[in-house]
Image: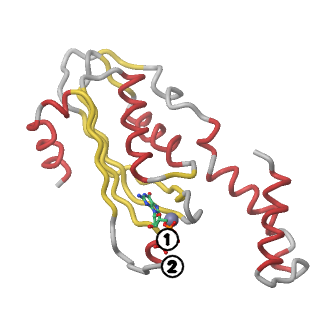
Amino acid sequence: MDQEKIKQGVRLILEGVGEDLNREGLVETPDRVARMYEELLAGLTMDGSEHLQKTFSVENNEMVLEKDITFYSLCEHHLLPFYGKVHIAYVPDGKVAGLSKLARTVEIFARRLQLQEQMTGQIADALMDYLKPKGVMVMVEAEHMCMTMRGIKKPGSKTVTVVKRGIFQEEKERSELFFQMLR
Ligand SMILES: Nc1nc2c(ncn2[C@@H]2O[C@H](COP(=O)(O)OP(=O)(O)OP(=O)(O)O)[C@@H](O)[C@H]2O)c(=O)[nH]1
Ligand SMILES: [Zn+2]
């Protein structure tokens, strides 16, 4: 990431809104914001396979659900946060991932400029590609600040996206079980 360019950009925004760049509270702001983007967009340089290489063998291929994984992302249209919960279910095919690795995979795709629909699909596809389970289902529930603090201003509105892969597309009962387990 080009920190110098981000700093220049922040200086231009501050000037553009009519601020005094030399005001005490703003002197370090371009630097802070550049460091912040490094953290908020850390997923850009990471690969979805990163945390899904190490697995554990299982004989029982029953569904695993990891729910309420909190995430914070940035919408690519306004650069404002959208945040909420990700729920991931998968049906293993002889191997499972460490539980924390599901949340780590969420982080990789959340820490980018995103569309919620795209993030949901990317998480599901990474699990299918690298963990090779029989199926994956991912649900994301989020509040978009571009919908709440600006524009249409509808605080509390939630966007829910769902992506199914493999056995979840073929067997309706699997998705029903997923929804039941979320209650
Ligand atoms: N599908 C989708 N849309 C999103 C997401 N995040 C933000 N948006 C929408 O992106 C759209 C951008 O619309 P534009 O008309 O180009 O921008 P705008 O004039 O700022 O739109 P308003 O928000 O309606 O004021 C808006 O409708 C946002 O609600 C997302 O994750 N998925
Ligand atoms: Zn937006």
The answer to whether mark 1 is within 8 Å of ligand 2 is yes
Front-most of residues 22 and 11: 11
For the point 43% across and 79% down, which residue is it?
A: 152
Residue plotted at (56% across, 48% down): 111
For residue 146, which numbered disc appears in the image?
1
Query: Which residue corresponds to mark 2?
Result: 150
Crowding near pointer 2: few (<14 within 10 Å), some, many (20+)?
Answer: few
**Quadrant hosting residue 129:** top left
* Distance of label 1 from label 2 (alpha carbons): 6 Å
Count of numbered tags:
2
Identify residue type, mark 1: Cys
Q: Residue at x 55, y 61 (%)?
A: 77
Across and down, in percent, residue 131 comes to 38, 23
- For label 2, being within 8 Å of ligand 1 is answered yes
Q: Amino acid at mark 2?
A: Arg
Residue 136 in the figure: left or right of residue 131? left
